[in-house]
Image (cartoon, coloured by chain):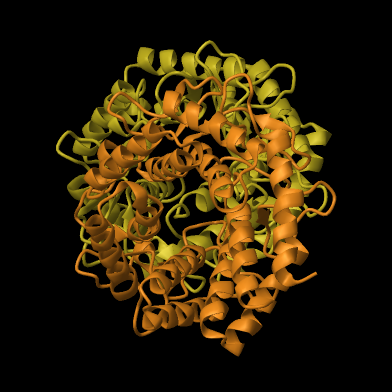
Chain colours: A yellow, B orange
Amino acid sequence: MSLSQRYQQNLLDDVLPFWERHSPDPTNGGYFTCLDRRGKVYDTDKFIWLQGRQVWTYSMLYNRVEQRDNWLETARLGAEFLKKHGTDDVGHFYFSVTAEGRPLVQPYNIFSDCFAAMAFSQYAKASGDAAYGELARIAYFRILERSDNPKGQYEKTTGVRKLKGFALPMILSNLVLELEDHLDPEEVDRTLDHSVHEVMNVFLQSDTGLIREAVQSDGSTHDSFEGRLLNPGHGIEAMWFMMDIGARRNDTELIQRAADTVLRTLEHTWDVEHGGIFYFMDAHGHPPQQLEWDQKLWWVHLEALVALAKAYEHTRSEQVRTWFQRVHDYTWSHFPDPEYGEWFGYLNRRGEPLLALKGGKWKGCFHVPRALLQCAQSLKKSGL
Amino acid sequence: MSLSQRYQQNLLDDVLPFWERHSPDPTNGGYFTCLDRRGKVYDTDKFIWLQGRQVWTYSMLYNRVEQRDNWLETARLGAEFLKKHGTDDVGHFYFSVTAEGRPLVQPYNIFSDCFAAMAFSQYAKASGDAAYGELARIAYFRILERSDNPKGQYEKTTGVRKLKGFALPMILSNLVLELEDHLDPEEVDRTLDHSVHEVMNVFLQSDTGLIREAVQSDGSTHDSFEGRLLNPGHGIEAMWFMMDIGARRNDTELIQRAADTVLRTLEHTWDVEHGGIFYFMDAHGHPPQQLEWDQKLWWVHLEALVALAKAYEHTRSEQVRTWFQRVHDYTWSHFPDPEYGEWFGYLNRRGEPLLALKGGKWKGCFHVPRALLQCAQSLKKSGL
């Protein structure tokens, strides 16, 4: 079995069946995402961004892999729930709702909206229902409206220290391509240009080759907890977004810079003692605020595999190939659960499961299937 | 050297000198609390609740241990900073400010206010400056005004699920005694009655003997992440507040119930594999949301020692004595730093330092000195 086949087989025969078996809520619509090691639902709250991510995943599989009826049906279950219960009166997406769809946590940022927009766009294509495309378009422009103050009344900083976060330009660079069917080509190009500039020329530091999670509004770094924060998973994920943009635009320099940044980030954040990529680090080597800094998270490692697979596809660099193998070996020997299927999400520094869950408040049906598919497709192109 | 002397010696010869040497900011007033292993300042932001806690600590030492000039001077440095830079226009205390005192993070809850009130009250007594007593009284009533909606505009829950938190009644039971000099005796008694009732009859579960971190407004438990949360450090800390109230009121039944609750909590949350008390647990045994759940934190263990010392002082129970020895042995062999002094704050599950810091955003000059003093005094009364 080729490497590519291994990724594809795990996706189709293990991960997707796990979610289809345990996650749908036929009574209320939507999905349960808090699943224990065996898949049993241990909490019924519904986190809107995870609802959106799962709608996106199943719609995307239907659109790009195979038009399976059960994939479309699974997507429909979440898309209708999201449409019916996802937003407040203004049209902003809640952070979470009850199993029945009653709102629990207010729309205190725009990440729920980003994943809802992606979900509606893919589902519009899968279902052929243009109404969802319009919902996607509306959500997208609401996100742009809120992008200067994404937390609204819930913003706790005073404005004395003006920092801007990496998450928004990073997500927009991916979101705008997801919504391409519903946007003007000029809007798409403008947003891509801006995102690539922000990511590669503002947040990426030319001296270290590392990405800061927040910088000052003038682009300079800031010596504070927020300003010193390194989030390698974010940085690496953004680099494969950049490589996709580079491939689309035939911009080999962008691809090369993104590939280099993946390597620099891995060299800096790889745990030489126990293996794996640290979750957070401080750019000056000070103690980070995040107590979970030394944990090994599933999505960080999967995003690294996607980025390395794409970097190898485009550059055929031996150094990239070596890093791919290193991350692949660590990932496959630690995260997949050989006994009950799907992947563990949270390991301690030594690589032992910290939580036996398969899904929770932050882990749903998204990073694992997306990365497995991306890797399978990219590795195949490289003949691996 | 007796046990009591060991606690007192560590306080006077190690912990306090460390903070006096490294923490004061003579330029701006106030204290730096982000100190690395050796005491070097690695971040200059000032977290208002840690400023308040340190003012309280030095004022309290001056009032209750010895009238040392340098203790009063250290307290003054922080009290004046807090008075000058601590509040917004309304009089609510910020969460954090810059080294110079410019506001960084808004007053998004009332914990900064609680510690400022305690600080001003102790400092009024130490300095003899009645103006600080008035500031303490004002802060106290502002806290009560906000107690129904402590987060104000920053509250992210919708109100669909009405849960109330343990932190407020727990803190009030201690705060009202700290402010006794500035309040009507009737206000003090009413608040004590209410807090004791909430803590012992509402949050303490009669079936398990454990305290929930949040319950529904009618007092029943709720099967959700928030409703299932156990925070053993909080529960145990509240129990020594209850024992102090019991001692004051000659309520031996309250003392006995509090002592029993400490033992139940320790039995339930002690890590039998690696030793130490877990930071968070789920009451139903599900995966907790907190990724740091298995870490061993300094304050949890110190609060347990205070609670056990007081429980032994009042009950002379052999079971309590055994648990005191167990927690004492773990704590003293893991947390104090033999090389550079003071105490490590954060250990991983195995008891290895996770962060080498002596102070940060949440660890300041408070739990270690308060617990060392409380233990020294209580152990002495028990002849230990």
> Is B267 placed left or right of A136 in the picture?
right
Q: Position of residue A155 (x, y in %)?
A: 36, 31
> Is B23 placed left or right of B307 in the picture?
right
Q: In which quarter of the image is residue A130?
A: top left
Name the residue: 76% across, 71% down.
B2
| Residue B379 versus residue B132 in the image, above or below | below
Q: Where is residue A79 in the image (x, y as percent from the top left)?
A: 27, 49
Q: Position of residue A310 (x, y in %)?
A: 65, 35
| Residue A180 versus residue B153 in the image, above or below | above
Name the residue: 69% across, 21% down.
A257
Name the residue: 46% across, 30% down.
B82
* Residue B63 shows in this picture: yes
* Residue B209 shows in this picture: no
Question: Of all residues shown, which one is farthest toward the left?
Answer: A89
| Residue A122 versus residue A36 in the image, above or below | above
Between residue A349 and residue A238, name the one nearer to us.
A349
